[in-house]
Image (tube, grey):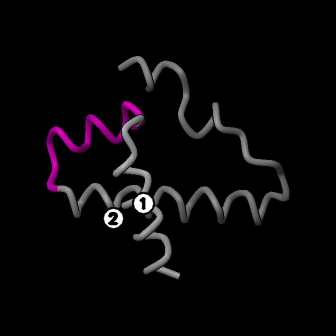
């Protein structure tokens, strides 16, 4: 599962349209650290969706005020 999350995180980072959160991390941390941080965020999001039984809310995951920062 860890490998799949890491590959998914690498794919997200490789996209041209990255979130402000990813861009700010890339500016101050090494690439592989950012990949691990994003994989962790993906795992926590998936766990929360599964355990709470709610649908995924992209605005809660990446709020507009964070995207503007």
Taking the image as shown, residue 55 lies to the left or right of residue 10, namely right
Taking the image as shown, residue 6 lies to the left or right of residue 28, namely right
Dividing the image into 4 quarters, which one contains the C terminus? top left
Q: Is residue 28 above or below residue 44?
A: above
Residue 34 in magenta stretch = no
The image's mark for residue 9 is 1
Location of residue 48 (image quadrant): bottom right
- How far apart are labels 1 and 2 at the CA level? 8 Å
Label 2 sits on residue: 36
Identified at 65% across, 62% down, the residue is: 46
Q: Is residue 43 above or below residue 67?
A: below
Tell me the magenta residue range: 18-30
Q: Position of residue 20 (x, y in %)?
A: 37, 31
Identified at 34% across, 51% down, the residue is: 14
Secondary structure beneath dot 1 equals helix
Depth check: give the residue in front, 51 or 3.
3
Q: Nearer the viewer, mark 1 or mark 2?
A: 1
């Amino acid at each position: 599962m860890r490998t799949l999350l890491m590959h998914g995180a690498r794919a997200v980072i490789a996209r041209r349209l990255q979130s402000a959160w990813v861009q700010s991390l890339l500016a101050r941390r090494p690439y592989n650290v950012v990949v691990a941080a994003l994989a962790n965020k993906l795992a926590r999001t998936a766990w929360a969706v599964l355990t709470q039984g709610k649908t995924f809310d992209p605005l809660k995951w990446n709020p507009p005020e964070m995207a503007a920062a």
